Image: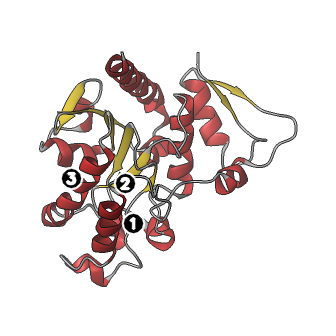
Amino acid sequence: MSVVVLAEISLDNSIRLQYLEAMGVDVWIPRIAAPIEQQLTEEPVSDQSNTNSANPAHSDWTLLQSRVAACTKCALCETRTQTVFGTGNQNADWLIIGEAPGQHEDLQGKPFVGNAGLLLTEMLRAIGLSRDEVFITNILKCRPPGNRDPKPEEAENCHGYLLQQLNLIKPKIILAVGRIAAQTLLKTDAPLAKLRGKKHTFNDTPVVVVYHPAYLLRSLSEKHKAWLDLLLAMRIYNEIEG
């Protein structure tokens, strides 16, 4: 059984504690510990500036970052604060793909921050992964105004960047986080309920669809299904590893 160690419980992370316990994940609470928000803030998270000079793809990665940062392919460039390229391990086995940056992501330049990001971090920890071990990005690299759904043409404009990230990272498995990420990657309009719980592929890479953590924060009744999806992803990954 998976075990997650949480710091002392605050009002904000009590929802995450309830979520993890209901999924069947044991939660240990140390007597003396920094708040979970402080731990996550202090935890070193690799970002696009952390590159490995020994990596032959280093220059390609840097060039791609520069292209994304300067992108003006659509009108989102006029309203963004900054682009959100992605963070994490550039040689990760796990690629986490969400929908689009929100307000917090637009301000910080990192994907999945705020309460949804905290929950995503705990979901990864529940299966033995840290944010340093995976790479997290989005279908869109710019925030849609008002956090509206991405338009098809916006997703298409960013699709080449996502493909280049995929080719450089060469992940062994992809988690499509939320309905829009799943539908865009898999080129389908099927509801998320029909997409989760099974193995898909994107460019020959296995894909598992999981609920978006923002949705789970609003719909705790779906938490057990989310845990089952994470277990499915782990089984697929372990089969690949042999």
Picture coordinates of residue 44 (x, y %)? 62, 53
Residue at 56 percent across and 34 percent down: it is 125
Residues at marks 2 and 1, CA–CA distance in whole angstroms: 8 Å
Give the tally of numbered discs.
3
> Would you name the residue on which mark 2 appears?
137
Q: Is residue 141 visible?
A: no
Picture coordinates of residue 228 (x, y %)? 41, 22
Mark sitting earlier along the chain (2/3): 2
Q: Nearer the viewer, mark 2 or mark 3?
A: 3
> Would you name the residue on which mark 3 appears?
163
Picture coordinates of residue 158 (x, y %)? 21, 63
Using the rendered view, name the quadrant where residue 61 is placed: bottom left
Judged from the image, the secondary structure of the residue bearing numbered disc 1 is loop
Residues at marks 2 and 3, CA–CA distance in whole angstroms: 12 Å
Judged from the image, the secondary structure of the residue bearing numbered disc 3 is helix
> Would you name the residue on which mark 1 appears?
84
Residue at 12 percent across and 44 percent down: it is 187
The label number, if any, that marks residue 33 in the structure image:
none
Residue at 34 percent across and 54 percent down: it is 56
Q: Amino acid at mark 1?
A: Val
Q: Amino acid at mark 2?
A: Thr
Q: Amino acid at mark 3?
A: Leu
Contact between marks 2 and 1 (CB within 8 A): the answer is: yes
Residue at 37 percent across and 59 percent down: it is 58
Q: Residues within 10 Å of mark 1 (few under 14, many from 20)?
A: many
Using the rendered view, name the quadrant where residue 5 is placed: top right
Quadrant assignment for the C terminus: top left
Is 90 situated left or right of 182 in this image? right
Mark sitting earlier along the chain (3/1): 1
